[in-house]
Image: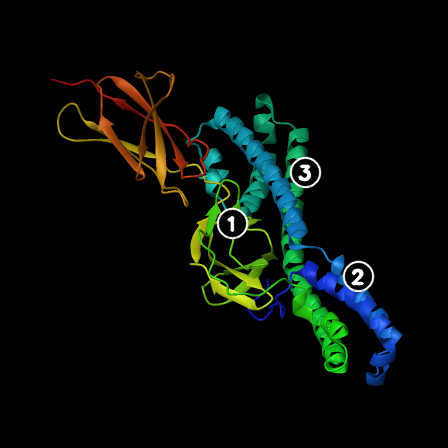
Amino acid sequence: MPTSIERRNYSLLDSELCMFGSNLTSTMTRDLSDLANFGITALAVTNLHSLVDSFEVFPTDDSLIGDVMIATQDKNAKLEIVKEIIRTMAVRVAMKWGENSGQYRKLGIAGLNNFSEDKMLVTARSVHHTMTGFLSDLTPFGLTSGLLSDFADAIDAYEDARNEQNDEMNLRDTKKVERINEGNTLYAKIAMYCDVGKRIYANTNSAKYNDYVIYGAGGGGGALTAPTNFAYNFVSNDFSWDTVTNATSYQIEASDNGTDWAEIYADAATIFNYIPSSGVSKHYRVRARNSAGFGDFATELLFTYYDSLSAPSNLTIGLSGAGFPQNIDVGWDAVAGATRYKVYRSIVNVSAAPGTYSYLELAATNSYSEVSVENKRFYYYIIAVNDYLESAASAAIYIDVPVNPT
């Protein structure tokens, strides 16, 4: 990934640098007889034109981000297929031996939705191996060699998709550095030829002199203020900020620690679509620029981005309080990125399956309590939420409330 060492050495937009370089080749061709006194030949102009052409077609970061997004979507889709197959395998084990059996425990899938991608891959391979051993026992429950083969293919497809996503992310990081370095190389070559041209025509031809002034092409100068209302929209995945007077373009930088910064955006628009790494806290800052240079940075943003929320897991339930009615206490593990939890409940007769669930409240913590009703079964499930995301529902949990003995 680019570090603070890989920085653009020019304040022009890349498109402006390409346009100026293309115009400069025409200017130099016109002035070759004067430039020849400094060893600048037609071949040098041709080589500069080649540098401009190469930089013009270099993949932009938007294009590379798009490839990463496509690979991520494909990986996520294949991950969901693997998860669903694991769940169907678990159902067969539960039908044969029950969820509290050693066979079910052997699958190792408790808290499946919270698994890291590495753990998910290892677990999937383990479940496939285990289910292969259970084949004869679970044939009456629909398990076949064909299903196991499809399962293995789904796991391989998921692993391939993960590798493809990683390759696209690495390629983006590599190309970002290459683009910065190639732009700096082109700018250095242009600046050298412009210095020669200005030296030749400084006292003889003001019109030709101006053709070699780089920062006339990048727009007017003028004082720049720090951008205001710098914000990130977690729904549309956009950075945005207010237009700065005298600005011709803007730069956004990102940092893991607030010290080492890398450029992630350089363009004229005041909105930038960007998807950060999920679950990673980062600092972001933006500043304006024009032909005179950069303005001050806006106030930094520091946030953690989540592309999804895991379903709450490890639900517990119990009764508390002396006498009747007692309190029902439900708890669950906190979900990374969640700020609140939706609580749903179904009350039925003891031993009955759950009926229609009703929404109860938006809990601020990972616990919920309410007063019980005797001789009833209480079912609960939980959904994690924040201002932008909502998880899948947790597994349901229940408790039977006894009859008041008095």
Nearest the viewer among 135 and 320 is: 320
Task: For marks 3 and 2, give the CA distance.
Answer: 44 Å
Residue 363 visible? The answer is: yes
Question: For the point 65% across and 68% down, which residue is it?
Answer: 215
Question: Residue 342, image x and y in percent?
Answer: 36, 31
Task: For marks 1 and 3, give the CA distance.
Answer: 39 Å
Nearest the viewer among 38 and 107 is: 38
Instruction: Classify mark 3: helix, strand or loop.
Output: helix
Question: Residue 12, image x and y in percent?
Answer: 64, 64
Q: Earlier in the sequence, mark 1 or mark 2?
A: 2
The answer to which quarter of the image holds residue 28 is bottom right
Question: Residue 14, image x and y in percent?
Answer: 67, 61
Residue 159 visible? The answer is: no
Where is mark 3, residue-wise?
153
Question: Residue 73, image x and y in percent?
Answer: 61, 41
Disc 1 residue type?
Phe
Q: Quadrant of the N terminus?
A: bottom right
358 shown above or below 70: above
Q: Quadrant of the C terminus?
A: top left
In this view, the mark in front (3 or 2): 2
Instruction: Classify mark 1: helix, strand or loop.
Output: strand
Task: For marks 1 and 2, give the CA distance.
Answer: 30 Å
Disc 3 residue type?
Asp
Where is mark 1, residue-wise?
239
Nearest the viewer among 159 and 207 is: 207
